[in-house]
Image: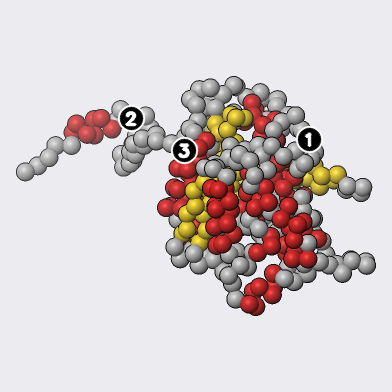
Amino acid sequence: MSVSTTGVASAQSTVPGYTEGAQIMRVEVTGGQIDTIGGVIYSQIKSQRAIRQLRMTLLVPRNDDLKPAIVYFPGGGFTSADYEKYSEMRTALAKAGYIVAAAEYRVVPDKFPALVQDGKAAVRYLREHAEEYGIDPARIGVIGDSAGGYVAQMVGTTNGEREFDQGVFLDKSSDVQAAVSLYGISDLRSIGEGFPEDVQKVHQSLAVTEALLLNGPAFGRFVGASVTSTPEKALAASSIGHVKGKKPPFLIMHGTADTLVSPMQSAHLYEALKAGNNFVEYVLVEGAGHGDLPWYQAPVIDRVVGWFRQHLGAPIKGKAKPARTNANL
C-alpha cells in the first residue's frame, strides 16, 4: 500500500527557510534562561599596604520574579576557597528559581574570624543589591561543604550577633533564613573524633590547618599553638559554641564513610540545635566519603533543592522591580 506524502511536502514548503532535505525540529519551552555574572567584588579588605578584593559569581534566572538567594561557600580545608566549583548543586538551585552566589573567603594564613566576617559580608552585599538582582531580601540562605560548611554553620548560628559584621553595608542584616551544611565542621576541637590514633595526633599538631586558622603560624617568638591548648577560644570559633537562642532552619548532611571530618561533627550540631527546639534535619548519606561522587548525584542535590524550597519558598512571579541598567554593582 502506498502512502501519499503530498500533504506533508506541501506543509513543509510553507515553513520559512525550508528547502528539500531540511529537518524540522519542534522545541517545547520548559525552562528559563540563567545568566552567569562573574568577577563580582562583594568585599574589599584593606590593610596598611594593600587592598584585597573578594569575589563571587552569581547565577541569576532571567525573569521578573522576586527570588530568594542562596550563598554557596566552598570547602578547601581552610587553605583554599575555589568558589566556582560544585556547579552541579549551584545550577540545580538556579534552575529551581534561586539566585545563587558562590563566594570566596579568606583562608589560612588569615585567622579566625576573617572567614566568618567574609561570609556575613556576602549576605549583606546581596541585601544591599537586592533590587538590582531581583532578590527578596527577606529570604536568603547559605550552603557550604566541608570548611565551607563550617562557614555556612557559623553564619547561621550567629544570627543576631553583630561582632562578626565588619566592612561595608553595615545597615543591612547578615542574618539568614536557612542554612545547609554538607560534611561541615562544627567543633574545631574534635574534627577527628572517633578516628584512629594517628589521625588524632594530626589534629593535635600545631601545624594542622584548624590550629593555624585559630592561632596562626609560628613566627618570631611565637612557637605556634594547638587547638586543644586554647579550648575556650576554639569553642568560640565553632558553631557548637553559638547554639543558644533561636536559629534558622538547618539541614545537616554527612557521609558515613567520611575519613577527613568525623560524622560526629554533624551529629553533635544536630543534637545541640534540636535541644534548643530549633528546626533541624540530619541526613546520613550511606557509604559517602568526603566530597566524593555520591554528593554530586541527583538524590542528594534534589534533597537540598527541595529543602530550600520548603524553607525559603518559591520565587514570587512578576514581583521584582525592574533592574536599573546603570546599577553600580
Crowd class of label 2 (few under 14; some 14 to 19; many from 20; radius 10 Å): few
In the image, what residue occupies the spot 30% across and 27% down?
14
Q: Is residue 309 above or below residue 289?
A: above
Assign the C terminus to one quadrant of the image.
top right
Marked residue nearer the N-terminal end (3 or 1): 1
Kindly identify which residue carries mark 3. 310
Does the residue at mark 2 contact the one at mark 1 (Cβ under 8 Å)? no
Number of numbered discs: 3
Between marks 2 and 1, how big is the CA–CA gap?
A: 57 Å
Residue at screen point 61% across, 67% down: 193
Q: Which mark is residue 168?
A: 1
As shown in the figure, which amino acid type bears the numbered disc 1? Val
In the image, what residue occupies the spot 49% across and 33% down?
Answer: 313
In the rendered image, is residue 301 in sight? Answer: yes
Task: Left or right? Give the position of 89 relative to 151.
Answer: left
Q: How is the image coloured?
A: secondary structure
Q: CA distance from mark 3 to mark 2?
A: 45 Å
Instruction: Tell us which disc is closer to us: 2 or 1.
Output: 1
Answer left or right for 287 relative to 50.
left
Q: Nearer the viewer, residue 165 or 130?
A: 165
Q: Are marks 3 and 1 in contact (CB under 8 Å)?
A: no
Up-down relation of residue 293 to residue 68 (above or below): below
- What amino acid is labelled 3 in the image? Gln
Element under label 3? helix
Residue 165 image position (x, y, % from top left): 76, 39
- Decide: few, some or many residues near mark 1? Use Cα within 10 Å; few <14, some 14-19, many ≥20: some
- Report which residue position mark 2 lands on: 15
Q: Label 2 is placed on what type of residue? A: Val
In this rendered view, identify the residue nearer to me: 249 or 47.
Answer: 249
Name the residue: 52% across, 35% down. Answer: 312
**Mark closer to the observer (3, 1):** 3
